[in-house]
Image (cartoon, grey):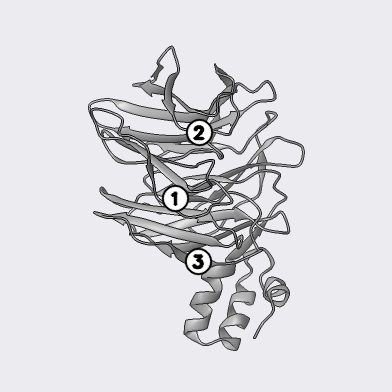
Amino acid sequence: MLKKSTIRRFLPAGLVTGTILLALLLPAGSMAALFASYGYSYGGTLSTSPGVSSGLDVSEDVFFGGTDKQLYQTHWDGTSFGGFVAHGGILNSNPGTVAQGPSNTEIFVRGTDNKLYWMEDASGTFSSWTPLGGVLSSGPGADYWTGVTAHMDVYVAGTDGAMWHRWQDNGTWNTSWERLGGVLASDPGAVSWGPGRADVFVRGTDNAMWHRWWDGAAWRGWESLGGILTSGAAVASCAPGHLDVIVRGTDFGLWHKSFNGSWSGWSSMGGGTTWTSDPTAVCRPGTTSVDVFIRGTDNGLWGFSITGA
C-alpha cells in the first residue's frame, strides 16, 4: 500500500505524469478512492481556508489569504489553473465568495478592524475594497440568485455569536443588519439553488451541523443535522432541490451529506489528518460535479471532485 508521503511526491502541483504513474500502480477502483481521499495539489501557501466561485461557464476562481494577509486568486480556465495573483487587503478571516452572473465574482472578508469588506471581480477587473460595517466574529458566507430581482446575501457571526445578515437587491445594499439567531462556532456556508431560496449551514457550539433556510417568504427555524464537526461547512447545489454539504470530522478527514428531497446519512470522503482548514465547494456549471478545495498539511491548495446529489 502506498504511503501518504509517497502519494504526495507523485503529485507535484497537479502534474499529469504523477497521475499516469499512479494509474499504473493502482487498479481503477483504488485510483478513484485515492483521489477522493487526497486530491490534486495546486501549490501556493495559504494562511486561511480557500473560497471558490463559478459563473455560468467552465471557469472557476479560488481565493485565499496568503502569509502576508493579502487576498490571492487562482483562475481555472476550463483546462488548467493559472498563477496566484495578489489583490491587496489585510484579511482577518477566510474569504467568502459567490458568483453573480456569468462573469462577476463577489468576495467578502473580515478586515483587521473586524468590519465586513467587499470586493467585486467584474470580468477580471477588480474593484477597490468597500466597507459594509458590522462587528464580525467570523468570516463571511454568501449566496446569490436572480428572479424578479438580482439578490445577494452575506452572512456572518456577530460579537454575540449569533448569525447576522445583510443583502443586496439589484445592486443596492439594504441599510441595516438582520439578526438570524443561533450560536455559531464557525463561518457560515451558504448557497442558493434558485430564485427565492437560500440555505445556510454552520457548526454549532455542540459541534453538530445546523441549518437554516429562506423558503421564498420567511426564514425557517434552525434544524440540527448532526455530525461532529471540526470545521465550518461547504455547500454546493447542482440543481434546484439538491444540496451537497462537506465538512471536516473528528478524524480531520472530510465527510459528506446530501439533500435530494430528504437528507442522506454522513459518508466519509477520507483524507484523515490531511486537511487543515474549512473546505469550500462549488458545482461545476452544467454538470453534477462538485469541486472541493481545501488547505493541506503543506499549507498548499488541494482540490478534487465528487458527484453531487
In the picture of the structure, the residue carrying the numbered disc 3 is 269
Q: Is residue 10 above or below residue 1?
A: above
Residue 275 appears in the figure: yes
Whole-angstrom CA distance, mark 2 to mark 3, is: 27 Å
Q: Is residue 231 above or below residue 186?
A: below
In the picture of the structure, the residue carrying the numbered disc 2 is 183
Quarter of the rendering containing residue 193: top left
Amino acid at pointer 2: Val
The first of marks 1 and 2 along the sequence is 2
Residue 127 appears in the figure: no
Whole-angstrom CA distance, mark 1 to mark 2, is: 26 Å
Q: Is residue 27 above or below residue 279?
A: below
Amino acid at pointer 1: Val
The C terminus, quarter of image:
bottom left
The first of marks 3 and 1 along the sequence is 3
Give residue 87's position: percent from left, percent from top: 65, 33
Label 3's element? strand
The N terminus, quarter of image:
bottom right
In the picture of the structure, the residue carrying the numbered disc 1 is 282
Amino acid at pointer 3: Met
Give residue 274's position: percent from left, percent from top: 65, 63
Identify the residue at the far front of this view: 206
Task: Please state which of the two labelled residues, at mark 3 or mark 1, is closer to the viewer.
Answer: 3
Residue occupying image coordinates x 55% and y 29%: 161
Number of other residues with Cα within 10 Å of mark 3, as a class: few under 14, some 14 to 19, many 20 or more = many
Q: 181 or 98: which is nearer to us?
A: 181
Residue occupying image coordinates x 47% and y 57%: 291
The first of marks 2 and 3 along the sequence is 2
Judged left or right of residue 79, residue 275 is: right
